[in-house]
């Protein structure tokens, strides 16, 4: 029964809707004098043909959306910075920040407006380490760019470190309803459960007082 409910899209549809519905529409950003666009990493992919690395399939949407937000911000001639948050989580010998920066440069984003946070290896560290850079920049408006299904957990973590973010989702994943079980729905369920586990772990760690504090983030 569980196999059927997942494969036909019923369970992943429910899980994904609870994660993403509030982010389906994209908010209009009211840019201020100092703005930070936080681009969260989603891994790197090795390309054997040319012995190089590039962003994963989840990442290109985030990179494109970050660039679009940057150009919208730049219209009012205020301070606009893209903070790329992502280290070498996969142990590939390259950081997500470095690889994504190359893509942003190809999109003609000025290098002076790109800030690298290349030490974090998960979403919690993304929030912890990036919060330090945001506070240093004294950004009044912080736009958080990630995948729709990843946004709820990301915002929760950033809020923990005292950073209020305006969420702008890049890609949006939905279940595919079918009479025949589809592999896609099992993958979607796996992605969704990963997010729910991350939220649950946050609250458990908070209860146990294991989570780093906002003050501790300034020491990293």
Image (cartoon, rainbow, N blue to C red):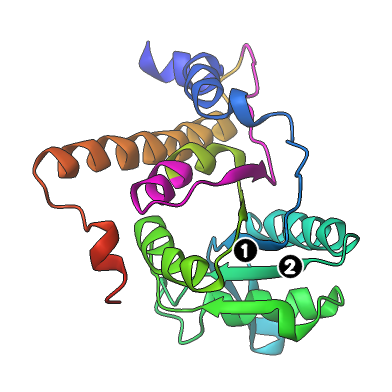
Q: Position of residue 216 (x, y in %)?
A: 23, 66
Q: Position of residue 148 (x, y in %)?
A: 60, 39
Q: Position of residue 54 (x, y in %)?
A: 66, 75
| Distance between the alpha carbons at the discs numbered 2 and 1 | 25 Å
Neighbourhood count class around disc 1 (C-alpha, 10 Å): few under 14, some 14–19, many 20 upward: some
Left-right relation of 10 to 48: left
Q: Quadrant of residue 120?
A: bottom left
Tell whether position 130 is magenta: no
- Residue at the right extreme, as displayed: 75
Q: Please provide the residue range marked out in magenta.
A: 154-179
Along the viewing direction, whichever of 123 and 178 lies nearer the viewer:
123
Q: Give the mark nearest the N terminus, 2 or 1.
A: 1
Tell me if residue 203 comes above or below residue 135 in the rendering: above
Closer to viewer: mark 2 or mark 1: 2
- Which residue is at 64% across, 16% downward? 177
The residue indicated by pointer 1 is 56
Along the viewing direction, whichever of 187 and 204 lies nearer the viewer:
204
SS at circle 1: loop
């Amino acid at each position: 029964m569980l196999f059927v409910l997942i494969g036909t899209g019923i369970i992943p549809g429910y899980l994904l809707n609870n994660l993403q519905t509030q982010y389906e529409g994209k908010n209009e950003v009211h840019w201020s004098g100092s703005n930070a666009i936080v681009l969260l990493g989603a891994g790197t992919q090795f390309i054997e043909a040319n012995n190089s690395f590039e962003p994963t399939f989840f990442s290109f949407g985030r990179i494109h959306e970050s660039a679009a937000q940057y150009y919208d911000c730049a219209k009012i001639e205020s301070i606009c910075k893209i903070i790329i948050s992502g280290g070498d989580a996969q142990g590939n010998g390259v950081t997500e920040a470095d690889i994504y920066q190359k893509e942003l440069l190809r999109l003609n984003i000025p290098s002076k407006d790109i800030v690298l946070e290349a030490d974090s290896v998960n979403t919690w560290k993304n929030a912890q380490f990036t919060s330090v850079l945001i506070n240093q920049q004294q950004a009044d408006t912080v736009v958080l760019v990630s995948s729709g299904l990843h946004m709820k957990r990301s915002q929760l973590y950033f809020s923990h470190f005292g950073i209020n973010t305006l969420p702008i989702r890049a890609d949006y994943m939905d279940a595919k309803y079918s009479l025949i079980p589809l592999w896609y729905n099992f993958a979607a369920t796996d992605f969704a459960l990963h997010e729910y586990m991350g939220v649950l772990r946050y609250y458990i760690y908070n209860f146990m007082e294991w989570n780093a504090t906002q003050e501790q983030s300034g020491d990293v």
